[in-house]
Amino acid sequence: NCLLLHSVGRNCFAMSRMSSVGVADKSRAGDNFSGSRKRRIGTMESELEKHLEETMKNPAIVGVLCTDAQGLTLGCRGSLSDEHAGVISVLASQAARLTSDPTDVPVVCLESDSGNFLIKNHESITVAVHKMAS
């Protein structure tokens, strides 16, 4: 489970710079981006989409979501959607406050009848994975 979160987190982290350039600015700026900047953001988005799709190929996984530090969605698939991004980001940041060691990054695991939700910060992003209960 932790290896899966780490792998998804590493893949999503490559896209996290998109949020600073990125997702929010892109929607506000419209056509004000230069051609190369649009291509770079488009490439990052397509790479993130590939990583999300690859994660969803695991039959045990029914949802995946990546958010930035402000809780804005970088990408999501399956059972996890934009409406979950803020809560997931807050859960991860509050869990991090439980330890005084900044290198100790906790994994939040929520168990329910619909499966397990694994949530972890990875650098400046938060990754959540919804797995079916085994």
Image (cartoon, grey):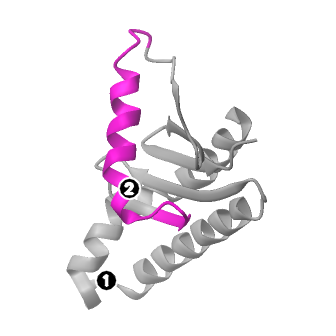
SS category of the residue bearing label 2: helix
Residue at position x 77%, y 64% in the image: 57
Residue under label 2, please give it.
84
Dot 1 or dot 2: first in sequence order is: 1
Which of discs 1 and 2 lies nearer the camera? The answer is 2
The span picked out in magenta is 75-101
Residue 112 x/y as whole percent: 54, 40
Q: Secondary structure at mark 1?
A: loop
* Residue at 52% from the left image edge and 72% from the top image edge: 45
Seen in the picture, residue 35 relative to 57 is either above or below; the reply is below
Residue 96 included in the magenta stretch of the image: yes
User: In the image as oriented, which residue stretches furthest toward the front?
Assistant: 113
- 63 part of magenta stretch: no
Residue 122 lies, in percent from the top left, at 52, 38
User: Quick one: which residue is furthest to the top in this view?
Assistant: 100
The residue shown at (42%, 82%) is: 38
Which residue is at the far left?
A: 28
What residue is pinned by disc 1? 33
Task: Judge left or right: residue 64 versus residue 18.
Answer: right
Q: CA distance from mark 1 to mark 2?
A: 29 Å
* Cβ–Cβ under 8 Å for marks 1 and 2: no
Quarter-wise, where is residue 107 in the image?
Answer: top right
* Residue 53 x, y percent position in the rendering: 68, 69
123 and 2: which one is in front? 2
Q: Is residue 83 left or right of residue 17?
A: left
Quadrant location, the N terminus: top right
Q: Nearer the viewer, residue 61 or 89?
A: 61
Under mark 1, the amino acid is: Phe
Type of the residue with mark 2: His
